C-alpha cells in the first residue's frame, strides 16, 4: 500500500508523529504486533505493543526484482518472543509486515515491507532474525525433474490423495518417548510394519503442540510393541499422555502409489525411464538379439 495523501501531507508538515510498526504471523496462526513507539498502536485488528523486545534495522529496498532485506533483533522475553518458541521452530517462515504509521492517527500509514523470517540466531539473551522480501522466492530453482519416482508430496494438489480417510492416519497418546524423537507404544496395532515410514508426525497437545516431524523408522518389535523414530527431535518437550498423529508415509515409488494408496492415475513419476546403467549394456551371445529394447 502506497503513501496516502493524508500521510504525505503529514510528512510535509514539518512536525510529525511517526513510528514503525511490524506484525509477525506464525504458521500456527499466532499474530504478534510490535512498535518502536512508547505507547501501543492498534489497526487491522492487531495491537502493536511497545517494549516487547523487538526492533527493526534499516530496510534495504530497490526497484526491479532484486531482493529486499532487513533484520529484526531484540531481547528474548517469555511474554513476547521466547527462546523456547525459536528452538521449536515456531517462527520459521513466519510472515512479517512493516508499516510507517502516524501514531496520532493510525489510519495514516504506509506498508514498507512484506516478507518472511529466514534464519534466526540467538545468544546472550537476544535474537536476530533475517527478514526476506517477497522477491526472494523468485530466486528459487524451479522445473520438473524426469525421474522414476514421483515428485509430488503425499496429499498435495498434484498427488490428489486424501490422507484423512480411514486407514492412513492414527491419533494416539504418547506412552514412552526418548529425546522427543523416539516413541514406543505397547499396543499400536492395525497398521503393517513400516506403514508410517517417511510419513508425518504432528503433536496435537502439550508443550510441542503444532510441531511436525518426519518419520525415519517405523518398526513392529518382536514383543508386539511399535517403535517410531523421527529424523529430528521435536523442538519442544513431548511427554507421556500428549496426543500425536501419525500419517502414512510414501516412498514415491510406482508400486507404493498403486498398491498402498491406489492412486496410480495421479502418479507423477516416470517409472519406465531407464537408469544410467543402460550406457553399459551390450548384446550378449546366446541371448535374443532381435533389436528390441534391452530393458523390458
Image (cartoon, grey):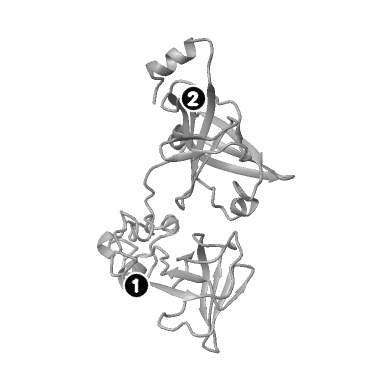
Residue 75 left/right relative to 276: right
Image coordinates for residue 287, horizontal then vertical, percent: 35, 70
Q: Quadrant of residue 40?
A: top right
* Mark 2 surroundings within 10 Å by alpha-carbon count, few (fewer than 14), some (14 through 19), many (20 or more): few
Residue 110 left/right relative to 19: left
Q: Please tell me which residue lies in front, 47 or 129.
A: 47
Q: Please tell me which residue lies in front, 288 or 188.
A: 188
Q: Residue at x 45, y 71 (%)?
A: 196
Q: Residue at x 58, y 62 (%)?
A: 234
Report the mark closest to the observer, 2 or 1.
Answer: 2
Q: Residue at x 35, y 69 (%)?
A: 255
Q: Is residue 56 above or below residue 211?
A: above
Counting labels gives: 2
Q: Residue at x 32, y 74 (%)?
A: 166
User: Which element is circle 2 on?
Assistant: loop
Q: Is residue 152 above or below residue 289?
A: above
Residue 185 left/right relative to 270: right
Residue 95: which disc?
none
Q: Is residue 29 above or below residue 128?
A: below
Image coordinates for residue 24, horizontal then vertical, percent: 50, 41
Image quadrant holding the N terminus, namely top left
Residue 260: which disc?
1
Farthest residue, direction right: 124
Q: Which residue is mark 2?
A: 104
Farthest residue, direction left: 265
Could you tell which of marks 2 and 1 lies nearer the N-terminus? 2
Image coordinates for residue 132, horizontal then vertical, percent: 52, 35
Q: Is residue 18 above or below residue 171?
A: above
Image coordinates for residue 16, horizontal then vertical, percent: 53, 16
Q: CA distance from mark 2 to mark 1?
A: 61 Å
Q: Quadrant of residue 3?
A: top left
Amino acid at each position: 500500500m502506497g503513501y496516502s495523501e493524508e500521510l504525505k501531507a503529514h510528512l510535509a508538515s514539518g512536525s510529525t508523529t511517526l513510528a514503525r510498526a511490524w506484525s509477525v504471523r506464525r504458521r500456527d496462526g499466532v499474530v504478534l504486533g510490535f512498535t518502536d513507539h512508547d505507547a501501543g498502536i492498534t489497526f487491522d485488528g492487531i495491537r502493536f505493543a511497545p517494549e516487547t523486545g523487538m526492533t527493526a534495522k534499516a530496510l534495504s529496498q530497490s526497484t526491479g526484482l532484486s531482493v529486499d532485506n532487513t533484520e529484526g533483533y531484540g531481547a528474548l522475553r517469555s511474554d513476547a518472543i521466547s527462546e523456547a518458541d525459536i528452538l521449536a521452530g515456531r517462527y520459521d517462515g513466519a510472515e512479517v509486515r512493516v508499516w510507517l504509521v502516524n501514531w496520532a492517527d493510525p489510519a495514516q500509514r504506509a506498508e514498507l515491507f512484506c516478507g518472511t523470517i529466514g534464519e534466526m540466531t540467538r545468544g546472550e539473551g537476544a535474537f536476530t532474525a533475517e527478514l526476506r522480501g517477497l522477491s526472494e522466492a523468485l530466486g528459487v530453482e524451479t522445473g520438473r525433474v524426469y525421474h522414476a519416482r514421483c515428485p509430488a508430496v503425499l496429499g498435495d494438489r498434484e498427488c490428489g490423495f486424501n490422507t484423512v480417510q480411514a486407514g492412513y492416519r492414527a491419533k494416539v497418546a504418547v506412552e514412552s518417548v526418548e529425546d522427543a524423537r523416539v516413541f514406543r507404544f505397547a499396543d499400536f496395532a492395525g497398521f503393517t510394519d513400516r506403514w508410517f515410514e517417511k510419513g508425518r508426525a504432528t503433536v496435537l497437545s502439550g508443550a510441542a503442540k503444532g510441531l511436525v516431524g518426519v518419520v525415519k523408522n517405523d518398526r513392529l518389535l518382536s514383543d508386539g510393541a511399535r517403535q517410531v523414530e523421527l529424523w529430528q527431535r521435536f523442538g519442544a518437550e513431548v511427554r507421556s499422555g500428549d496426543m500425536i498423529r501419525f500419517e502414512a508415509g510414501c516412498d514415491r515409488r510406482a508400486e507404493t502409489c498403486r498398491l498402498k494408496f491406489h492412486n496410480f492415475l495421479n502418479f507423477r513419476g516416470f517409472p519406465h525411464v531407464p537408469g544410467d546403467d543402460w550406457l553399459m549394456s551390450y548384446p550378449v551371445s546366446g541371448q535374443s538379439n532381435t533389436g528390441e529394447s534391452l530393458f523390458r
